Image: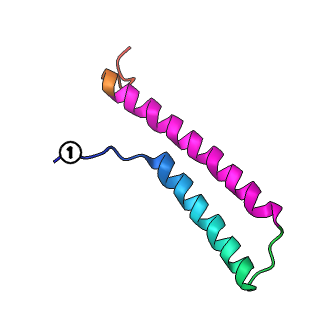
Amino acid sequence: MNRHPMEPGKLVAGLFVLGVAAVYGLDAAGERDVRSLVPLVVLVCGLCAAGVVSALTYAARRKRARGTDGSTP
């Protein structure tokens, strides 16, 4: 069976987008009063966090593929 590699950056981005969608949903339902700028700032920060996680994942996979673990001089 072909398996796709785990991509934590997409997971982080998806969780932030779901969170922002939930906040907008609560605002539309009248449960919470949220200023319109707050979810957008959270979304941008979430996408930046997803980018950092993706970069770290790429670096770790590249290091593992090379076979270097940093223990040899």
Q: In percent of the image, x 73 and y 79: which residue is there?
A: 28
**Residue 57: percent from left, percent from top:** 45, 38
Quadrant hosting residue 25: bottom right
For the magenta stretch, what is the residue range?
A: 36-64
Quadrant hosting residue 29: bottom right
Between 48 and 66, which is closer to the camera in this rendering? 48
Q: In percent of the image, x 38 and y 32: which residue is there?
A: 61
Label tally: 1
**Relative to 64, does residue 50 appear above or below in the rendering?**
below
> Image quadrant for the C terminus?
top left
Q: In percent of the image, x 39 and y 23: which residue is there?
A: 70
Q: Is residue 12 magenta?
A: no
Kind of residue sitting beneath label 1:
Asn
Residue for badge 1: 2
**Relative to 67, does residue 20 appear above or below in the rendering?**
below
For label 1, the SS is loop
**Residue 33: percent from left, percent from top:** 81, 78
Name the image colouring: rainbow
**50 sits left or right of 68 in the view:** right
> Dominant secondary structure of the magenta stretch?
helix
Between 8 and 66, which is closer to the camera in this rendering? 8
Q: In percent of the image, x 63 and y 72: which residue is there?
A: 22
Residue farthest toward the top in the current orientation of the protein: 73
**4 sits left or right of 38 in the view:** left
Residue farthest toward the front in the current orientation of the protein: 28
Q: Is residue 41 magenta?
A: yes
For label 1, the crowd category at 10 Å Cα-Cα, with few meaning under 14, some 14 to 19 and many 20 or more, is few
**Relative to 46, does residue 29 appear above or below in the rendering?**
below
**Residue 3: percent from left, percent from top:** 25, 47
**Residue 60: percent from left, percent from top:** 42, 33
